[in-house]
Structures are given as structure tokens and as C-alpha cells.
Image (cartoon, rainbow, N blue to C red):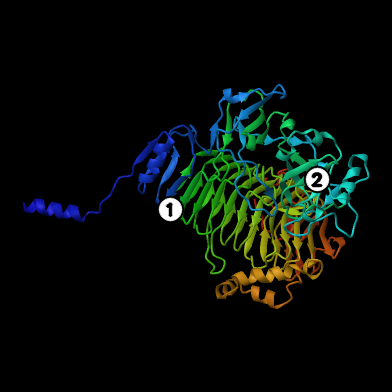
């Protein structure tokens, strides 16, 4: 008995351990049940198949949990949509041979929404996907844009507020053609009310006058500036060849002669569904018109507007190897969590973003994922506290991001960096109409990325863009390869806009870029060292002092931004910041250009004073708003690449560049 009592006591003192379990699930109900009951260390393994979610999969308060496919190579797909049976597609009266009509009233379909620059970003409307590829709203005119050369009324706008006919200081920009000759008469006779309109333009072709329900259409394009794409609903198309929109645009409509980005087209007209992959929605009547791609086997419709997976108050949760597709909203949203990772996933065909990591997350990130065919950008990477200087240490690494702004094209990059102390590493980013990375915040790191074929349809922007806030300091851009950004308009590889400051850029290669790869827009303390600029038929660096001239009004906003973070912790962490603000912030100071190679480059620098552009090859001293400039080398000969066509292959032993710049740091 004594021995039994001793054994019982010892067992009582031993720590109780519960073995980890594997939950093998086969449907949404069993998946939700497994998530609810899972304990630390458990694995939830999804059998192959598609798990269609009508609401998010919520993972709350879990620790050390893995969610992954049961069998490697056998996909488990989380979907926010439904599969459309083929028998639901009907031939319709007056429809072309390959066009079908679908009754969508049986599903909670979301109608088309206003999108664009300056408008709140959010889930898309319900979209169709054919064999895993996104279809698109019908377009008129097909394959081209109409020039915005006939503005009848600028309209009430978010930015300017004014409405009415074209600006009183200039005549209406309606061309004197027979097609639009009635537009001016309409404005004068009061057939519409310019003082309350959201905008009116004139057009020439007769085709829009033949549409049965033009109010289903949406006007899409750049209505004033080349960085501000918008999509706004049509109120009316009138017999006098005018088109009026039914909601506020950000800048209003404004015509500028010679501006190539002022263009428009019309979406979602049923009569214009005539190409494979097109569709139009008539939600009020519960109908859709589709022209399916040839041999389409699977047709899906996205419905869910919330994230497919919501993770909150978790630690050590891993989402690994899943596919997430066919939804109106985000793929995964993470908040108030630590060490949560999304690994080896394929995230595609979403109406919004792939992954959103909130400001209250630490050491969370995305690793080894492919993210594509997204509606409004790839990853929101937030985290850290700028006021108290607390790092987030969140990350995106070893990922491929492409085709990520199908719907919202303005300011919806592959990655948005916010907060303090986060990182993007070893990612490939390509094939986008807009930016690759928006760089906000402090002590952020962008490294070892391959960025190419971005900014394909945007003006006055950059592959990496940061700007307008001098308190965003300590950022580093290193060892990236920027190449093949060749467009006939004004874009950069790295754009420090409107007084951006205190960024270190080194070890990068800038190759085959049609505009100056770097622009420093009036800022200070920006350091470029040990970079290689090559194959440029333009200047390598464009720099100006805009805060002293046309951009002087930016300084008021700068004061507001600084006040938001200024305090003992901030000043102690950035001791160089107080001298900047106590001096003349409008005067570029502390910019450095040292140990850079300019290989087969037309000019080193383009300096802009007011509107006067000065091009030169100054390599030493202090000029062009640089406080320090030395040990740079311009050459027409190979500086030492093993293969100049593939500069990432590295350098030959003892490359010539080190004879000219002995301290140059070689980066593979």
C-alpha cells in the first residue's frame, strides 16, 4: 500500500501532457469543428477537394496549430464562390451564338461598385471565373480607349469640390465636330444642371446611343491625372452625345491638351459582350450575360466579401500548402497575433488582397507563396509602433506576386509596407499596371527582390514609391534587381516623392528602364551607394528642390505628419531628425551619392530647378542637391559582369570597377 501511494504521488507530480492530434477533415462542417476543438500542437489536414465557404473560417485564440492539405500534391481549395451548373446557361433572344444568359437571382450577387483613386478600397463585386481564370466586364470600345478631349462639365469632385461647366477661365473643351455640336447647346439650354453634376463628357460615335440600358454601364479611365484611375457609374447617355456620371470622382473631369493618360472606356454593357471571357451584370433584373472561353469546363461565381480565413489573437498558427480562390474579399486577414505564417500557398482570383497583416501583429508573415489575379493588391504588411519605436518584424519572403490589380489599379501595389521594422525579402514582382511596393513607415527593409514589368499603365509613379512624410526614416532598399520597366511615360524604379527623407539605397542594379530610375523629389538625407545603373537612354538620377518652389505647400502637411510621431522615443531613435526640422526643411541637405557605377548611361544626373531641366555627368564634389558626391564611375565598357545580359550572374575575378572604385561592395 505504501508503494502504491508513492507511485500515485509521483504520477500527480508529473506534468500532464496531452498528445497532439491530427484532424482529417473532408468538408466545411468538419473543418470548422476541428478548428473549434483544436489544442496546441494539433494538425488539421484537409482531404483533396474544394471547401466552399459562405462565411470566413475564423481561427481565434489558437496556439501552435497547423492547417495543411492531407496529401502533398493533392490540392485543398478554400473558395468563396459557387460553381455554376452548365444547364443554368441559356440562349437568349438577340444574343450572339456564343453568348449565354444566366439567372443570378438565386444567389446573393453583389453589384458593381465604384472603385479608384481616393476611394476607400474594399471587396469587389461578384465576378465570374472560367476554368480558374478571371473573366472581365464587357468593354467598349474593344481593345482601345477613347481620348478624354471633350469635357462639358468638370463636376463636383472630392479634391476640388467645385462643379459646373468647364472652368470659367477657359472655354468648354468640346471639339467642333458634328457629332458633339449639340453638347454645347445642351449646356446652355439647361437640359442638364452643370452646377450640381458629378461630371459630363461628350463623345462622337453613335454606338452608345443604341444601348437598351446604358445606366448599367460604368465609365472607367483617368479623368484628369495619369496616376488616378477610377470607375464610376453612368447616370445617363443622351441623344446629344453626352454622358453624365452618377457619383463623385476624386479630381473631377479635366482636359489637358497632349495628356496621353486622359482616356476612358465603358464597362458592363450587355450588348458589348461579344468576346470570349466577357460578361455583364444586370443585378436589378437578376441576369448576367456571358461569353465563355472555348471548351470551358468549370464556371464559378464569387460571393463572399469577407476574408476566407480570419486569424485573431493567435500564436504560432501556420497555414501551409492551401489554395485560396474565387472570392470577393481578401484571402487571409491576421490581427492581434504573433508568429502566424502563411506558407507555400497559392492565392489567386480574389476581388481584393491576398493577405492582410494588421498593425497589432508581431513576427507574422507570408513565405514561399504565389499570389496572382488579385483585385486590389497583394499583401498589406503592417506592424510596429512608430511613436514608441517598437518593431513589428513582420515579413513577406520568397514569394511571387503578379497580376495583382485587376480591378483597383491606382495605388494598389503588390505589397504595402506600414508601421516600423518590417521586411520584404527575395520576392519576384511583375506584370502590373501600377506599383510594386508602397513604402511607408520607419526602419523598413526591402532586399534581394526581382522587380520588373511594373508601372505599365500609370504616370508619375515608381516601382517602389514613398513620399510626403519626412518622419518616415531609417528605411533600407538593398541588393534588388530593377529591370525592364520600359514604358513611354514618366515612371521610376525608386521614387522618393514630395520631400521623402532618410532612406539608404545600396547594392541595387537598375537595368533597362526608360525614365530615370531614381527620383528624389526635394527630400534630404537620402543615401545612394554601391549601386549599378546600366543601359539607360536617360539620366540615372533625377533630383529637384520642389519644396522651395512649386511644392512649397507640402510643408504644411509635413508638420502634421511629424506631430503624429514626435516625442522622446522618436527623437532618441533618430538623432539626425531634430537638425533637419530645426533648419530649412525645404532645402535638400545630406543627400549622398558615392561609389556608384554608371554603365552605358546617357547622363548621370537630371537636375530640375523650377521647370528648367539640366543634364550633366558631375561625379565629384557637391552638386545637383547632393551634399556629398565622390568615387563614382561612368563607363561605356562592361564594368566586370560575367554576363552583361544577366547581371545577377555576378562578376569576374578582379572586375574593372574595383580598379576605379577600390572600395565598391560587390553584391551578387
Residue at 19 percent of width and 54 percent of height: 12
Bin the neighbour count of mark 1 within 10 Å (Cα to Cα): few under 14, some 14-19, many 20 and up. many
Residue at 40 percent of width and 44 percent of height: 35
- Position of 127 compared to 141: left or right? left
Cα separation, mark 2 vs mark 1, equals 47 Å
Bin the neighbour count of mark 2 within 10 Å (Cα to Cα): few under 14, some 14-19, many 20 and up. many
Q: Which residue lies furthest to the left in this view?
A: 1
From this view, report whether residue 634 is shown above or below residue 376: below
Percent of width and height locating residue 537: 83, 50
- Position of 465 compared to 149: left or right? left
From this view, report whether residue 575 is shown above or below residue 422: below
- Residue named by callout 1: 314
- Position of 224 compared to 502: left or right? right
Percent of width and height locating residue 515: 79, 52
Kindly tell me whether residue 651 is visible in this rendering: no
Percent of width and height locating residue 353: 59, 47
From this view, report whether residue 158 is shown above or below residue 272: below
Percent of width and height locating residue 355: 55, 48
Q: Do the residues labelled 2 and 1 touch (CB within 8 Å)?
A: no
* Element at label 2: strand
Residue at 58 percent of width and 24 percent of height: 86
The residue lying toward the viewer, choosing from 442 and 325, is 325
- Say which mark, if any, is on residue 338: none
Occupied quadrant, residue 45: top left
- Position of 602 compared to 288: left or right? right
Kindly tell me whether residue 518 is visible in this rendering: yes
- Residue named by callout 2: 263
The residue lying toward the viewer, choosing from 85 and 353, is 85
Occupied quadrant, residue 205: top right
* Element at label 1: loop
The residue lying toward the viewer, choosing from 602 and 259, is 259
**Between discs 2 and 1, the one toward the N terminus:** 2
Amino acid at each position: 500500500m505504501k508503494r502504491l501511494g508513492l507511485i500515485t504521488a509521483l504520477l500527480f507530480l508529473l506534468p500532464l501532457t496531452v498528445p497532439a492530434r491530427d484532424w482529417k477533415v473532408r468538408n466545411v462542417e468538419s473543418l470548422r469543428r476541428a478548428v473549434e476543438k483544436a489544442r496546441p500542437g494539433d494538425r488539421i489536414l484537409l482531404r483533396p477537394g474544394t471547401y466552399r465557404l459562405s462565411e470566413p473560417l475564423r481561427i481565434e485564440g489558437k496556439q501552435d496549430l497547423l492547417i495543411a492539405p492531407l496529401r502533398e500534391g493533392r490540392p485543398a481549395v478554400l473558395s468563396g464562390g459557387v460553381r455554376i451548373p452548365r444547364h443554368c446557361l441559356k440562349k437568349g433572344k438577340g444574343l450572339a451564338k456564343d453568348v449565354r444568359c444566366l439567372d443570378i437571382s438565386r444567389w446573393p450577387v453583389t453589384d458593381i461598385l465604384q472603385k479608384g483613386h481616393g476611394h476607400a478600397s474594399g471587396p469587389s463585386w461578384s465576378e465570374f471565373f472560367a476554368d480558374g481564370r478571371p473573366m472581365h466586364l464587357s468593354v467598349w470600345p474593344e481593345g482601345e480607349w477613347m481620348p478624354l478631349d471633350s469635357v462639358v462639365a468638370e463636376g463636383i469632385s472630392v479634391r476640388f469640390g467645385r462643379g459646373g461647366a468647364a472652368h470659367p477661365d477657359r472655354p468648354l473643351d468640346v471639339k467642333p465636330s458634328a457629332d458633339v455640336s449639340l453638347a454645347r447647346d445642351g449646356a446652355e439650354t439647361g437640359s442638364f444642371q452643370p452646377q450640381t453634376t458629378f461630371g459630363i463628357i461628350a463623345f462622337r460615335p453613335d454606338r452608345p446611343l443604341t444601348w437598351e440600358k446604358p445606366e448599367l454601364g460604368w465609365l472607367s479611365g483617368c479623368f484628369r491625372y495619369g496616376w488616378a484611375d477610377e470607375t464610376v457609374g453612368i447616370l445617363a447617355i443622351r441623344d446629344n452625345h453626352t454622358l453624365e456620371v452618377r457619383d463623385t470622382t476624386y479630381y473631377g473631369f479635366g482636359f489637358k491638351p497632349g495628356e496621353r493618360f486622359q482616356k476612358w472606356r465603358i464597362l458592363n454593357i450587355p450588348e458589348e459582350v461579344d468576346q470570349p471571357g466577357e460578361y455583364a451584370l444586370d443585378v436589378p433584373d437578376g441576369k448576367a450575360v456571358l461569353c465563355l472561353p472555348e471548351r470551358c469546363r468549370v464556371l464559378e461565381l464569387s460571393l463572399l466579401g469577407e476574408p476566407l480565413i480570419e486569424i485573431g489573437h493567435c500564436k504560432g498558427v501556420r497555414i501551409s500548402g492551401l489554395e485560396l480562390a474565387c472570392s470577393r474579399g481578401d484571402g487571409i486577414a491576421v490581427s492581434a497575433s504573433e508568429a502566424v505564417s502563411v506558407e507555400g500557398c497559392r492565392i489567386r482570383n480574389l476581388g481584393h488582397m491576398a493577405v492582410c497583416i494588421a498593425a497589432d501583429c508581431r513576427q507574422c508573415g507570408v513565405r514561399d507563396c504565389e499570389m496572382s489575379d488579385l483585385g486590389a493588391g497583394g499583401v498589406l504588411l503592417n506592424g510596429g509602433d512608430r511613436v514608441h519605436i517598437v518593431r513589428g518584424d513582420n515579413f513577406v519572403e520568397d514569394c511571387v506576386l503578379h497580376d495583382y490589380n485587376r480591378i483597383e489599379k491606382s495605388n494598389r501595389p503588390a505589397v504595402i509596407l506600414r508601421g516600423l521594422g518590417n521586411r520584404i525579402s527575395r520576392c519576384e514582382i511583375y506584370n502590373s499596371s501600377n506599383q510594386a511596393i508602397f513604402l511607408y513607415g520607419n526602419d523598413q527593409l526591402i532586399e534581394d527582390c526581382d522587380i520588373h514589368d511594373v508601372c505599365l499603365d500609370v504616370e508619375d509613379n515608381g516601382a517602389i514609391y514613398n513620399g510626403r512624410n519626412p518622419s518616415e526614416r531609417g528605411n533600407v532598399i538593398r541588393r534588388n534587381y530593377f529591370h525592364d520597366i520600359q514604358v513611354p511615360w514618366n515612371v521610376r524604379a525608386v521614387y522618393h516623392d514630395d520631400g521623402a527623407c532618410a532612406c539608404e539605397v545600396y547594392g541595387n542594379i537598375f537595368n533597362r528602364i526608360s525614365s530615370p530610375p531614381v527620383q528624389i523629389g526635394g527630400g534630404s538625407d537620402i543615401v545612394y551607394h554601391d549601386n549599378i545603373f546600366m543601359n539607360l537612354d536617360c539620366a540615372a538620377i533625377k533630383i529637384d528642390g520642389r519644396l522651395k518652389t512649386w511644392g512649397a505647400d507640402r510643408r504644411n502637411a509635413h508638420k502634421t505628419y511629424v506631430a503624429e510621431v514626435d516625442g522622446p522615443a522618436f527623437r532618441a531613435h533618430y538623432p539626425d531628425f531634430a537638425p533637419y526640422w530645426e533648419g530649412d526643411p525645404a532645402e535638400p541637405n545630406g543627400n549622398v551619392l558615392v561609389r556608384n557605377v554608371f554603365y552605358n548611361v546617357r547622363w548621370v544626373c537630371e537636375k530640375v530647378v523650377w521647370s528648367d531641366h539640366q543634364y550633366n555627368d558631375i561625379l565629384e564634389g557637391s552638386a545637383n542637391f547632393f551634399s556629398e558626391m565622390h568615387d563614382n564611375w561612368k563607363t561605356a565598357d562592361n564594368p566586370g559582369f560575367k554576363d552583361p545580359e544577366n547581371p545577377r550572374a555576378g562578376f569576374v575575378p578582379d572586375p574593372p570597377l574595383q580598379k576605379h572604385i577600390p572600395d565598391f561592395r560587390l553584391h551578387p
